Structures are given as C-alpha cells and as structure tokens.
Image (tube, coloured by chain):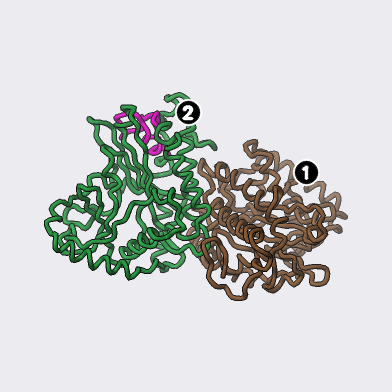
Chain colours: A green, B brown
Amino acid sequence: MGISITKETKRLKTMLLHWSIAHSSFYNMLKVPEHQVAGHLAIDGKLGPLVDDSGRFYKPLQGDGRGNKELAFYESFSSDTRVPDHIRKYFPVCYGSQLLEASNGSGLLHHLVLQDIVSSHRNPSIMDVKIGSRTWYPEASDNYIQKCLEKDRRTTTVSLGFRIAGLQLYGGKESGYWRPGRKEVQSFTVYNVRSILRRFVSSNSSIGNENSDCSFAPSIYGGSAGILEQLLELKAWFEDQTIYHFHSCSLLILFDKESVSKGSASVPEIKLIDFAHVVEGKGVIDHNFLGGLCSLIKFVSDVLSDSKESSIKDCVESEKPGICTDNGNCQ
Amino acid sequence: MGISITKETKRLKTMLLHWSIAHSSFYNMLKVPEHQVAGHLAIDGKLGPLVDDSGRFYKPLQGDGRGNKELAFYESFSSDTRVPDHIRKYFPVCYGSQLLEASNGSGLLHHLVLQDIVSSHRNPSIMDVKIGSRTWYPEASDNYIQKCLEKDRRTTTVSLGFRIAGLQLYGGKESGYWRPGRKEVQSFTVYNVRSILRRFVSSNSSIGNENSDCSFAPSIYGGSAGILEQLLELKAWFEDQTIYHFHSCSLLILFDKESVSKGSASVPEIKLIDFAHVVEGKGVIDHNFLGGLCSLIKFVSDVLSDSKESSIKDCVESEKPGICTDNGNCQ
C-alpha cells in the first residue's frame, strides 16, 4: 500500500513535461552513471538511470506502479514535518520527476530526479546493503511473497538481516576498482559479508583478494562522524518512528579512499535509497528494518573493535572461513 | 540445529530416574498448573505440564526431539560463562530432567524440571508474548517453514514482530480472571494487542471489556524495576549477544494486581520461556528477536507515555479501532 500522490505533484509533473520538451538539448548532457553498483544499468540498450554534470540522478519510473510509489514516497517524506532534520540528511534530495528520453531508446519516459549521491566523491568505495530479514511486506500477493522469500533464504537476508546487493572497492590508481559481478554478489555467504566489511576499510591496493588489512576502520567506521555513529543515529530513529516501513530499501555506504590515504578530511556517507516498497507504518515501528540495521551495526562494531584492540596483523583474514566466535572473530 | 547433550546430563538423568522410581509417592503431590495461559494443558487425559507445592514446574519432553533440544539448551545456557548474571534472572532455573508419570496416563515420561515462575504470585495477571517476526529458522524444512509462515502472517507476528500467545488478566476478588480462549487469542489484531497492553495495567475490575483505564502503567510498566526497564536491559543484551537465536520463544510478563492495588511493593516479572527452537547464533545477533522486542518496547512505552502525560480519561479506550497516529495513540 503506497502513499497517495498529491495534486501538487501532478501539476509539477505536467510543468516539467513542458519544460523538458522545450529544452531537448538538455538530453545531450546525460550519461550512464560511472559508479552504479546495483540495479539495472543503462547499457547495451537497456533501461537504467542516467546522471548529468550538475549532480542529479535520473531514475526511470518503473512501469508496474513501483515508480509512482517511489515518487509518492519522496513527496510524502519531503513534506512530513515529523521527520527530524538530522534524519533527512540520510535521504537523497528529490527534485520531483521529469520526462526524458529513456536510455533504451523507447521514447519519452518519466524519471525521478534525485541528488546524485556519488558525484561529490572522486574514487568512491561503495556498498549497497539491502536491509531487513525479509524484503516482502504483509499486504503483498502470495506469489510476490514466495518469490522474495526464496531469494531472502538464498542470500544472507534471512540469516543476517541484510544482504550486500552490490559493491565496488577502490584499490588505488594502479589496481582501480574491484566490482564483483551480480551472480558473485548474490552468492555471498555470512563469511563473505564479514570479509567484505573488513576489505571495505583496507589500506591495501590489492583489494580483490582476501589478504587485506582493515587499518582504515578507525577513520571510516569509527569517530564522531564515522559510519558507526551514523548507523546508530539512524537506529535511534527507527526505534521510535512508526510513519514508514522500508521494505527492500538499501543503505548506500560510501567514502573516498584516496582522501583517507592522504590523511585529508573525508566524511564517509550513508544514504537510504530505493523506496518502491515503502508502506505506511500505522503506529508500529519498522522492526524488520531495525533488526537488520542492528545486525549490520554489530558487524561494523566487530571490525572496528578488532582494528582498535589488536594489531593490523590480527585484522588480516585467514584464507579459510574457520570458526566464528561469539565476538565475531573468525579463527 | 540444537546444542549437544553432555555426558554429565545423561548421568544426571539416570540418577534422577532411579531417584524418582524410589520415591513414587512424590507423584501424589503433582497437580495441573492453575495459571497456565498457553501451550497444552494437562486436563481431560491430555499430556501437559505439572507443578508441585515446592515451586517446581514439570514440563513433559516433547517427543519429536524438541524436548531434548530444550533440555540441551538449558544445559548449554546454565554452563555458559558468556551469559551475564543480570541476564540469567530472565530465565527460569532448570533442575535437570526427571522421569514422571505423564499426565495423560501413558506411563513414565521424561520431564524438564523448571522453576515454577508463577508460584510466587498470588493472583497473577500474565501475558505470554511470542517474540519475533518469524517463528521459523533458516535450517528448518520447507514444510515447517510454510506452516509457521502461514500462522505468522495470520497472527500479528509478521506485522508487529510479536504475538500474544495467551493471557489472563486478574480483575479482582469478585470478577476473578479474564482468560480469552485459544481461538480468540489467535485472532488478535494489532488493535487488540494495543488494547490488551493497556488493559493489562488497568485498575478496573471489569477487565474483560474495553472500558478500562491504564492507571497502573506507571507502577507496572514504569519505574526502575518496571517492565520497560527490564525489557530495555534484555534489549541491550540482544544487541550484542551472538550465542543463541531464540526462535519461537515467549516472554512471560506477570505481576500481582492485588499488591499494586494495596500499594504494597510488587515487582513485575519477565521471564523467557520455551526453548525447543533455539539454535546457535554463530557470530550473528538474533535480529529477529531483537526487532520484535523493540516493537514490544515501543508499545509498552506508548501506554506508559499516555498514562503519564494525560489524565486517566485519555487512557480509556474508545470502542472502535479508529486511526493510530505516529505516537501510537488511537483516535
């Protein structure tokens, strides 16, 4: 059950339609996002999101109503005074919708116009983490629930309360990015996830293999502006907010490795994305999202504790999974 | 996957077998529990738990391996030094197992010997709250998962992250107990659950209907020894502990209404019960239990806030469900 679209938006959409048709040269500036780690890519004649040089991200409205649901969510969210300002910063800014030439050449199509979160980062390391131990919602059809349930059981969604849906890790100028394919990502086990949360904050350039330290953990995961503090701020909100249930949403976690390597101030970022399956909370907290978020927090805390309490050597992983003890250490 | 039974327990069981056969007159003292609100009752020739006058609760070991799993859990738990003392008090004391004449007349049967939690209460109001938005676990069979999923969707388990599995509310000397039948309990909606959490702490004697206040909320839910503080203490442990995943467990919440009415000190109690489906945590927190626990905490907090911030009148429920606002108030 989505949130209803207001008249104001319909008016805005019509206005934007006229504007975009009048400024068709604008399309020339659009391009395929360089750092998209999950979802459909706008390549090989396929439909996908586009970006421009001014920091905007154009996401085609999905046809089966999901696109309109996501637009409706952004409208509801942006005007909801119950959402505190310190929480708003975890959501991309939405500039409404716009008719654009679709990337698959199918003609004009409505696109959500969003803040391009990645544009302010030079060589971002990115993780797309889908939160929750179920991606379906009670009101969905039996078929949809069974389809989601099957994937939730196949991935770490059920066991961990979250799954990595995509990622790219920046090694350095020479090694570039490590970006595992969709099939590899979908087959990640609990052990792989723990490993990736360590490699994400590794100083090594050979980031694709497992011989990575986690020496950047204190500066990325830790500190007053670090990932852990941000996750805890979100958690406090989720313990109380009963406005929305965020099914199948992702947390995008990103930072610039080069800035950290050079010792310059770099603030790691967290943003919530993908709101096609948000439903009203109706006075109940989003316990599904909250449980998964707490699980992710525990994993991040474990990496941070290990990197602080022991030498870098202890943070380097062994090559085999081994046994994971209660404090999250794998032997 | 259960926790393995140690040799020590086997030895203990054999010893108890000999002891119980030698003291067969002991059986005469056993009786059907007066205040059991969920599970199988030992009446009409059925198999169920028994109690004695010394504060012990005898639970027949369920035949399909579940009984042994529960015994194995108690053994593992009682000897696990990672469990802090302030958490142990939320679990019944286990005195091993014992061969007893089963309540259904089928002969000698192993029983778990547990602390009878209710025995120290004179006229207890009790809620049995099954925690978690799923009662199944990933390693279970497809059939078992589908069966649980169906019930989880039919009850408030999926929507709320918990369901009330049974209850009795004490009204007073004249009105006695209100104990809804199993079918009624299984049909509880979100609205009913919110209503019962208010009625649980009502001073009224006509507790079976909805014209109840929630004026005992400050003394039962609130305060440093109240239900809310106890739930928060449990929550803090669940945010960190990765030893066990408690599937299909219940929180038993109980207090003596008469003591509160008379103004005498009465400490409301919380106990975790039913451990036949506990599995190893393997380094991951029990996000399923934690999410549901946080949802229950929010509900209890809402009742407490309402009772504190407004007059008793505002805490009295309206007769129709109405609309629930973000802060949990139903209009």
| Front residue of B206 and A74 | A74
State which mark lies toward you, 2 or 1: 2
Q: Measuring 71% from the left and 45% from the top, which residue is drawn there? A: B89
The residue at which mark 1 appears reads as: B15
The amino acid at mark 2 is Lys
Magenta stretch, main secondary structure class? loop
Q: Secondary structure at mark 2?
A: helix
Instruction: Using residue B177 as the reference point, say whether residue A251 is left or right of it.
Output: left
| Image coords of residue B154 (percent x, y) | 53, 68
| Image coords of residue B147 (percent x, y) | 52, 64
Q: Residues within 10 Å of mark 1 (few under 14, many from 20)?
A: few
The residue at which mark 2 appears reads as: A308
| Image coords of residue A59 (percent x, y) | 26, 57
Both marks 2 and 1 on one chain = no
* Residue B37 magenta-highlighted: no
Question: Callout 1: residue from which chain?
Answer: B
- What residue range appears in magenta? A194-216
Question: Callout 2: residue from which chain?
Answer: A
| Front residue of A45 and B113 | A45
- On screen, B304 above or below B74? below
- On screen, A173 above or below B154? above
* Residue A199 magenta-highlighted: yes
The amino acid at mark 1 is Met
Check residue B125 in the rendering and tell me which mark sits there, or answer none.
none
